[in-house]
Image (spheres, rainbow, N blue to C red):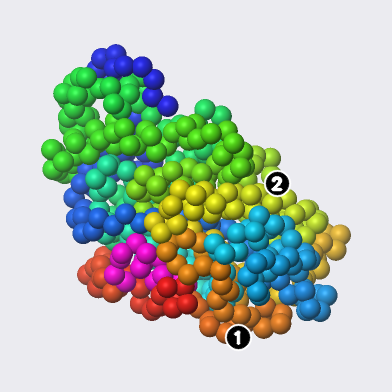
Amino acid sequence: MFKGPCSGPMARRDLLKVGTLALGGLSLPELLAARSKSPSTRNHDNSVILFWCYGGMSQLETYDLKPDAPTEFRSVYKPISSSIPGMDFCELFPQQAKLADKISIIRSMHHRMNSHSDGHIHGLTGKPPVQADPTSNQKSEHPDFGMIASKLLGRHPRALPRFVSIPSPVNYTRVNYLGVEHQSFPVGDPSANNYSPPHLTLQAGLRGDGLLERQQLLAQFDRLRSNLDLHGTMDGTDTFRQSAFDMLTHPAIAKAFDISKESDDLRNRYGRHRWGQGLLLARRLAEAGSSVISVAAGAAKDGWEYTNWDDHPGNNGREGHFARFLKTRLPYMDEALSALIEDIHTRGLDQKIMVVVLSEFGRTPMIRVGPPNGSTGRDHWPQAYSAMVSGGGLNMGQVVGATNSKSEYPTQSPHTPGDLLATIYRHLGIDTLHEFDDFAGRPIPILPEGEPIGSLI
């Protein structure tokens, strides 16, 4: 949080400290200079908040329970009903169940990518890797939807970052031929004490609305530019200077990131953990005008031995996810997501903001018993998995698609990652037929396949 009036020009070392933002080796000034060259083709104000459950969220323990399946298949949790017929939730999701009329569940998501990297790439780019990678180490050849939104929506008129990641970027996708300036802005953990995103903090006690020595600060940027412009990357000096100044000093930036302005009651309602405070910050950024905000749902708090949703038997040498991790993880998720959905509707933002809960795939229908000590879990299963959406002006209070009695494969209205991404792009006002030239000069469409999910629109 900015305090006090301007105390004079900033030292160059302080400015360098302010400007450093490790995104593919670019500092903040370099990043902004590159962004100043990007065409602004739209001025769409809608936003998407992605709650990314990295590792593979089990559909059978969240949104597609099968209480009548044989013991080795059925969920270890009981379903609870909601006000919407056929829309049952896990018993650890009581708050979401109360909001069923503001939620839609897609139970028929599917693809063929069985490794984390490949499922991740397909899910967020809509383009499956040409060759599967069983080691889960592959990086994408194409940018994800947040990077594309940054490219096509252009620089925000209030200097807000278009694509933000909380606390850090999701794995496996790369910006590639769009240019490194369209990577996400990682902003750290907003649940930390005295949180302030480091790359937006002015070191000399400056206020975004109290800088009286504007020309002195711009002169500092000019001197910084002369030291960084080694390869002609800082061309367009006037636009760069204004962009850099606005990013660091614009009141809208400081206001959007100042989560301390929220009441204690609301912060408590979201939950005093990474997921809760992350989604609260995401709502603030979406309300202010950021286009895509991803919240990486790894560990909700420090000290967790198991930080993602990859719930195989005996992971980390422990007793398996059914005995410990999901039982801890799901209440945090329910608390944070239900608070976000309520908050969005209370503020009248349910047309503007679309919430998406997603993983790279689901988990195997059959529970596997494995070492150590006969622990239980489920393995990777891309053939059927669930997603949850809320807001975005979409049709809520429905279940889209269905799987068979063991959640092995879709039986109604099957949908691919391309379909869900097409729905997201439609909300952002982006034409999925638009093409970019890759490094070889080949035209690459935003989505090679996929249509918006008809029942949602």
Horizontal side, residue 332 vs residue 267: left or right: right
Horizontal side, residue 204 vs residue 136: left or right: left
Q: Secondary structure at mark 2?
A: loop
Horizontal side, residue 273 vs residue 311: left or right: left
**Residue under circle 1?**
411
Give the position of the C terminus as an image quadrant: bottom left
Residue 226: % across, % down? 17, 32
Give the position of the N terminus as an image quadrant: top left
**Crowd band around label 1 with a 10 angstrom C-alpha radius: few (<14), some (14–19), many (20+):** some
Q: Residue at x 50, y 73 (%)?
A: 132
Residue 203: % across, % down? 36, 23
Q: Earlier in the sequence, mark 1 or mark 2?
A: 2
Residue type pointed to by label 2: Glu
Q: Residue at x 35, y 68 (%)?
A: 426
Q: Which mark is residue 314?
A: none
Please give the range of residues in magenta: 417-432
Residue farthest to the bottom, as pictured:
411
Q: Residue at x 36, y 53 (%)?
A: 291
Residue type pointed to by label 1: Thr
Q: Magenta: predominant secondary structure element?
A: helix
Q: Of discs 1 and 2, which sits in the foreground?
A: 1
How far, Cα to Cα, is label 1 from label 2? 37 Å
**Is residue 196 or residue 64 the one in the foreground?**
64
**Is residue 378 or residue 51 the one in the foreground?**
51
